[in-house]
Image (cartoon, coloured by chain):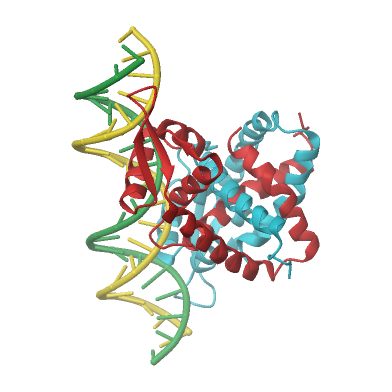
Chain colours: A cyan, B red, C green, D yellow
Amino acid sequence: MPDLDHGDDVAAVNALRSGVMRLSRRLKHQRVDESLSPTEISVLGTLARCGSATPGELARKEHVQPPSMTRIVALLETKGLVSLEPHPEDRRQKVVKQTEQAEVMLEEARRKRNEFLAALADGLDEDEWAKLRAAAPVLEKLAHL
Amino acid sequence: MPDLDHGDDVAAVNALRSGVMRLSRRLKHQRVDESLSPTEISVLGTLARCGSATPGELARKEHVQPPSMTRIVALLETKGLVSLEPHPEDRRQKVVKQTEQAEVMLEEARRKRNEFLAALADGLDEDEWAKLRAAAPVLEKLAHL
DNA sequence: TATTGTTATACTCTATAACTATA
DNA sequence: TATAGTTATAGAGTATAACAATA
């Protein structure tokens, strides 16, 4: 385990928390699609990686409560971005899958996101950008440890 | 400007956004003080660094609208964590300062935060932790570019 | 009896619009 | 006329509690 007693780590921890909270607020407003909340986009991203998942699995991965995921999945289904199928082995559960429309949407979203971050990245030098690139997967890991 | 056309950067951008959003959700729940929202804590952190600021300055730094900052400052004042003084040169403005109680609280908060992150950090190796440490200030910079 | 998911409800945080006071 | 801050109101997102269906 990293030694958190050092002053450097204490400062880093503060910067990390503060940076994550403020940046999340900015990203929340810089939506790739006005009709999609950050969590909805994140769910679609998860489905794109995992193929499919049950509402319960999605709730655990996104760190929201089951009733919240029920609502999110229902909204995504209304928008035609996911389909719900019965679970093959357990009739209590459901299987959430992304539709083809979601794949098209994600591709478009990726393009817009890159434009936004490219604009932000104008203020970063190559070294700073490299540090972010290196930390990105660690942030993801930290998010669901 | 970093070249965002590369596949690596596209993947990093996705991981960055997704990681920041999910981690922010976790941090939101892992509050150092149940009665303090993440933005309230962030405002206190800013005041600890800058000494004092006007509500308008705080709103810009935290990326919230002025009416939201009015409410946040009012809540912090109710809790005895900030004091409001008249601006010496402009009677429209106010000066927000942290109280001694806030300093004590922040010290306690830092201790609890470190416990929480130390627990999380159990799942990271030294190399991953170093990457986070390096990226933390860049995240902060990105948050208010 | 435990678990998955849903329904009903309430809360927290933030935004927008309209207003007041000062520059 | 422009700016700093406030008041009033609305909306988005999530949580908790209670419930239904299935294991």
Query: Residue D5, position in %: x, y?
Result: 33, 32
Q: How many marks?
A: 0
Compared to C4, does B83 lie above or below? above
What residue appears at the point 76 percent right and 60 percent down from the top-left corner? B128
Split into 4 quadrants, where in the image is the N terminus of chain B?
Answer: top right
What residue appears at the point 41 percent right and 63 percent down from the top-left corner? B34
**Residue B111 visible in the displayed image:** yes
Image-quadrant location for residue A10: bottom right
Query: Residue A37, position in %: x, y?
Result: 47, 45
Query: Residue A90, position in %: x, y?
Result: 50, 77
Of residues B10 and B96, the one nearer the viewer is B96
> In the displayed structure, does residue A32 sit left or right of residue B57?
right
Split into 4 quadrants, where in the image is the C terminus of chain B?
Answer: top right
**Residue A99 visible in the displayed image:** no
Of residues A104 and B65, the one nearer the viewer is B65
> In the displayed structure, does residue B41 sit left or right of residue B22?
left
Image-quadrant location for residue B5: top right
